[in-house]
Image (cartoon, rainbow, N blue to C red):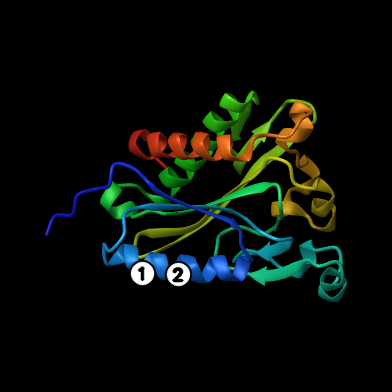
Amino acid sequence: MTVSIQPTLEVRDLGLVPYDKATRLQDELVEQRLRNEIPDTLLLLEHPPVITLGRRGSMTDVYVSEVDLARRGIAVERTTRGGLVTYHGPGQLVGYPIVHLRQRGLTVPCYVRALELAIVDALAETGIAGRIDEDHIGVWTDSNPAGKMAAIGVAQRRGVTLHGFAVNLQPDLSYFSLINPCGIGSLGVTSAVAVLGHPVDMAAFKARVTDALDRQLAAVACSR
């Protein structure tokens, strides 16, 4: 049976959601997407303070104990996404696309590139020059203060994606000093508010990144 590809993403704006709850929701949606009960879907949300360890992550990249983190109100979660250690918290826009790669004819590397390009496009519309680094997954800026603007860590089950991206709009960057983010903390972490000198309209950025991701998923072409 031939299944038509949904031309657009269905967006669910969830607000502030604990990491473990968002993980359970993704698990449910992946199964629904595999059964073609829902279209490709983008979850947009923020998390309370949490440090997450990807499949290759370990506590060696976390500079304080889990006990101390708990005292500070910071959760620690092991996760199935790719990558090492990162931080999520309020002011950071997190996106979890539930996308059927096989129906779209995309490989995981091409999908990751689509995420990177979509974030670069959305940042450009916000007034920030973002760029891709061929040696490191994510989105970066050379604007002052330079550094990593967005982290990307994905997984897929039978061709359907989960996890996704996190864009630093106006999070408290001091939390990143507690970890070696993505194992490359020496390269720096920055945010939109640090670059622009004023907060970013979260709702407007959500619309920009959604539109950009829709375009990039339809247009991206790569040989990776």
The residue located at (68%, 39%) in the rendering is 149
Image x and y of residue 213, in percent: 44, 39
Q: Secondary structure at mark 2?
A: helix
Percent across and percent down for residue 165 are 56, 49
The answer to whether residue 99 is seen in the rendering is yes
Which residue is under mark 1? 31
* Badge 2: residue crowd in 10 Å (few <14, some 14–19, many ≥20): some
Relative vertical location of residue 23 with respect to residue 220 in this rendering, above or below: below
Res. 114 image quadrant: top left
Residue named by callout 2: 27
**Would you say the residues marked 1 and 2 are in contact, meaning their CB atoms lie under 8 Å apart?**
yes
Residue at 64% across, 23% down = 127
Question: Which residue occupies 26% across, 52% down?
Answer: 103
**Residue flagged by tag 2: what amino acid is it?**
Asp
Frontmost residue, 139 versus 33: 33
Determine the image quadrant of residue 192: top right
Q: In what quadrant of the picture does the N terminus appear?
A: bottom left
Residue 96: image x %, image y %?
A: 50, 54
Label 1 amino acid?
Answer: Glu
User: Label 1, label 2: how many angstroms apart (C-alpha)?
Assistant: 7 Å
Closest to the observer, 150 or 196: 196
